[in-house]
Image (cartoon, rainbow, N blue to C red):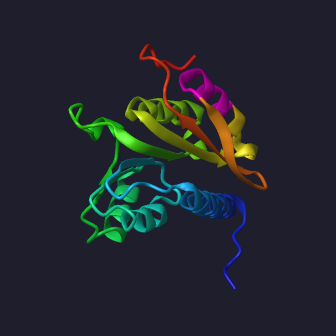
């Protein structure tokens, strides 16, 4: 049995456990939904659960590519190590690391990074949507207990045909098929 911590250490331990459970559950929900073509270009934004998701998706992409964006240097190193040997997976630390001349992505998935604050989550969502191909689909996964509806409302302002595609208790996944005409994607 693990050691039980109290005070600040206990709060941090419980927060880490909650974040791991959040990432694992939502990564599995996304894996059940994502059916990329073998030559698809995919972008996954978000770290809890990113390594697990990427490991399973990489094998579905014969000639395709998967780019995974995580948030911290430690996550970058851990995710790269976990995915070493998968030649069609690239791990980056910021979406700005992507070349502007790269083709858009057929599929974008995002696990809401509630632990980084609402503004960061909304910015990541906007940047992911901006990288989506015209006929592409964005999947957004999150938790009702962490303001998921706020992210969905924001997505509805930016994209067409936003609908819930999966739910499990407090966890939800919505899909947006296509983005609205280019314009300002600033947070309102």
Q: Main secondary structure of the magenta part?
A: helix
Q: Position of residue 113 (x, y in %)?
A: 55, 45
Q: Position of residue 177 (x, y in %)?
A: 53, 35
Quarter of the rendering occupied by the C terminus: top right
> On the picture, is 105 further left or further right than 103?
right
Q: Looking at the image, which residue is at 32% across and 36% down?
A: 104
Q: Quadrant of residue 17?
A: bottom right
The answer, for residue 71, to whether it is visible in the render is no
Q: Looking at the image, which residue is at 58% across and 61% down?
A: 32
Whether residue 18 appears in magenta in the rendering, the answer is: no
Whether residue 159 appears in magenta in the rendering, the answer is: yes
Q: Quadrant of residue 4?
A: bottom right
Q: Position of residue 102 (x, y in %)?
A: 23, 37
> On the picture, is 142 further left or further right than 159?
right
Q: Looking at the image, which residue is at 57% across and 43% down?
A: 140
The answer, for residue 173, to whether it is visible in the render is yes
Camera-nearest residue between 21 and 117: 21
> On the picture, is 6 further left or further right than 33?
right
Q: Looking at the image, which residue is at 59% across and 29% down?
A: 155
The region drawn magenta spans 150-160
């Amino acid at each position: 049995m693990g050691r039980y911590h109290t005070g600040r250490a206990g709060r941090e331990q419980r927060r880490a456990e909650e974040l791991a459970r959040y990432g694992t559950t939502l990564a599995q929900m996304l894996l059940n939904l994502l059916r990329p073509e073998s030559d698809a270009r995919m972008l996954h934004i978000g770290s809890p659960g990113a390594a697990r998701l990427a490991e399973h998706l990489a094998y579905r992409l014969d000639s395709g590519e998967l780019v995974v964006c995580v948030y911290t240097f430690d996550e970058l190193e851990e995710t790269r190590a976990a995915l070493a040997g998968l030649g069609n997976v690239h791990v980056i630390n910021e979406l700005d690391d992507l070349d502007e001349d790269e083709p858009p992505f057929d599929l974008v998935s995002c696990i809401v990074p509630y632990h980084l604050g609402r503004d960061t989550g909304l910015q990541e969502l906007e940047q992911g949507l901006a990288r989506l191909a015209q006929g592409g689909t964005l999947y957004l996964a999150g938790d009702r207990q962490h303001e998921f509806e706020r992210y969905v409302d924001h997505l509805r302002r930016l994209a067409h045909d936003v609908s819930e595609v999966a739910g499990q208790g407090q966890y939800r996944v919505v899909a947006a098929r296509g983005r609205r005409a280019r314009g300002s994607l600033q947070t309102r």
